[in-house]
Image (cartoon, rainbow, N blue to C red):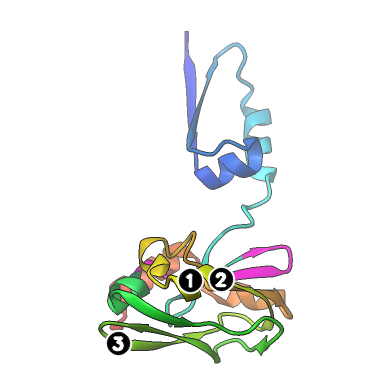
Amino acid sequence: MARFVAQISRCAARSVLSFPHEATFVASAKSFKPANFIRHIATTHRCNAERRYTDKHEWVTVDGKIGTVGISNYAQDALGDVVYAQLPDVGSLVKKDEECGALESVKAASEVMSPCSGKVTEKNEAVESKPALINSSCYDEGWLFKIELSDPAEVNTLMDENAYNEFLKTDPH
């Protein structure tokens, strides 16, 4: 009996099937209908949590009109152990590519630049009280702040993960 095996990413699995991990689907040749399977995958909306990056190593994920902002693994590694985080206050307005906070580590200090314009709706108070979360979990528990995007199209000007990885390989930082 012929078998069809398809691998889908965690992102696609979550948005299509609400699975928390990568999934493998196996179907017998008799029950598999390629046109239906391909149409279902092709028409599925892209994952809202696609991470976009700036050339200053901040990232943003967007859910509706709310963007969650943090720094990349590359940035946290370059900084070393983060010991202090100054985040923008809730209600403050931030502009794309402008300074809105600061991080200090045992090695250096770095400005936090906003990847998008908008109004700060939440800051990660856990990071302010325990800045090491940035080092241990920069993409999950170590996010910095959330903003209501004033121009959601700004996100499209940022690098996707593949472009950011290429940027890291080619650009002297």
* Residue type at tag 2: Asn
Q: List the residue tagged with mark 2.
A: 124
User: For the residue labelled by badge 1, is the local secondary structure a helix, a strand or a loop?
Assistant: helix
Instruction: Pick whichever of labels 3 and 2 is earlier in the sequence.
Output: 3
Asked whether, in this view, residue 12 is left or right of residue 141, the answer is: right
Which is nearer the eye, 99 or 125?
125
Marks 1 and 2 close (CB-CB < 8 Å)? yes
What is the x, y in percent for residue 141?
Answer: 49, 61
Query: How many angstroms separate mark 1 from mark 2 (CA)?
Result: 5 Å
What is the x, y in percent for residue 22?
Answer: 48, 37
Quadrant of residue 79 within the rendered picture: bottom left
> What residue is rendered at 50% in x and 43% in y?
9
Q: Which mark is residue 108?
A: 3
Asked whether, in this view, residue 57 is left or right of residue 67, the answer is: left
Instruction: Pick whichever of labels 3 and 1 is earlier in the sequence.
Output: 3
Which is nearer the eye, 19 or 136?
136
Query: How many angstroms separate mark 3 from mark 2 (CA)?
Result: 21 Å
User: For the residue labelled by badge 2, is the local secondary structure a helix, a strand or a loop?
Assistant: loop
- Determine if the magenta segment contains residue 65: yes
Q: List the residue tagged with mark 1.
A: 127
* Residue type at tag 3: Ala
Marks 3 and 2 close (CB-CB < 8 Å)? no
> What residue is rendered at 68% in x and 29% in y?
36
Magenta range is 62-73
Quadrant of the frame with the C terminus: bottom left
* Residue type at tag 1: Val
Numbered disc in front, either 3 or 2 = 2
The residue sitting at the front extreme is 129
Mark 3: few, some, or many residues within 10 Å (few <14, many ≥20)? few
Looking at the image, is 95 positioned above or below residue 5? below
Looking at the image, is 170 positioned above or below residue 9? below
